[in-house]
Every structure is written in C-alpha cells, then in structure tokens.
Amino acid sequence: MEVYHGADSNPRYCAGAALIDPENPARVLARSARPILEPEANYEREGFFGGVVFPCGHDLCEDGTLTVYYGAADETICAAETSVAALMDSFD
C-alpha cells in the first residue's frame, strides 16, 4: 500500500492511498475512491501554501494502525492515524 498526494481543480492538495501489486509494482490494483486526508483544519487551509496536505511517510503498527506523517500548508508537520481496515474500505 502506498500513500500519495495529488491536486484537484479547486486547487488543493489531498492524500490518497493505492494498493500496488507486489509482483509488478508498476501495476496499481486499487486506489482510494476519495481522499483519505484533505485540508480541513485552519493550519491546513491557511499558511504559506494553503489548502495543502502532503504525505511525507507512514508507519504501520502491528495492531493495524497506520500513522501518516504529512505537511500542512508548507508550514507544519503533522500526523494522522487511521487503520489498514479503513483504508481497505476506501478502495474502489
């Protein structure tokens, strides 16, 4: 599983997740249908480059908790937690 960011037409940057084929990493098996993280808080919407969240890395715990470390508005480093199960439910 990969966590990535991309822009929409608003413009704002959001994070999504993709499930990658381990045998052929060029093949995307599924992508999150909607952003898994989007700029909502003031510190994500306002700042040097507002309306931006961009993942910088993630950590998977044994209990299935995924912590995503991300930048917000090019001013702040943050962390958000979710579960692998929730991400799997987000795939289309």
Image: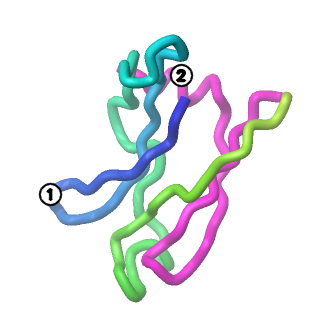
The crowding category of the residue bearing disc 2, from other C-alpha atoms within 10 Å (few below 14, some 14 to 19, many at least 20), is some
Residue 16 lies within the magenta run: no
| Residue 80 position (above or below residue 84) | below
Q: Quadrant of residue 9?
A: bottom left
Q: With 5 as the anchor, is 85 left or right in this view?
A: right
Given the image, on which type of amino acid does mark 2 rest?
Met
Question: Which residue corresponds to mark 2?
Answer: 88
Residue under the image location 52 percent in, 56 percent down? 55
State the residue lying farthest toward the top. 23
The crowding category of the residue bearing disc 1, from other C-alpha atoms within 10 Å (few below 14, some 14 to 19, many at least 20), is few
On the image, the x and y values in percent for residue 47 come to 41, 86
Q: Which residues are magenta?
A: 63-92
Instruction: Indicate the colouring scheme.
Output: rainbow
State the residue lying farthest toward the left. 9
On the image, the x and y values in percent for residue 83 come to 67, 33
| Residue 61 position (above or below residue 84) | below
On the image, the x and y values in percent for residue 26 come to 37, 24
Question: Which residue corresponds to mark 1?
Answer: 9
Residue under the image location 44 percent in, 63 percent down? 53
- Figure quadrant of the N terminus: top right
The alpha-carbon separation of the residues under discs 1 and 2 comes to: 26 Å
Compare residues 43 and 74 and report the one nearer the observer: 74
SS at mark 2 in the image: helix
| Residue 19 position (above or below residue 73) | above
Compare residues 1 and 11 and report the one nearer the observer: 1
SS at mark 1 in the image: loop
The mark total stands at 2
Given the image, on which type of amino acid does mark 1 rest?
Ser
Q: With 52 as the anchor, is 3 left or right in this view?
A: right
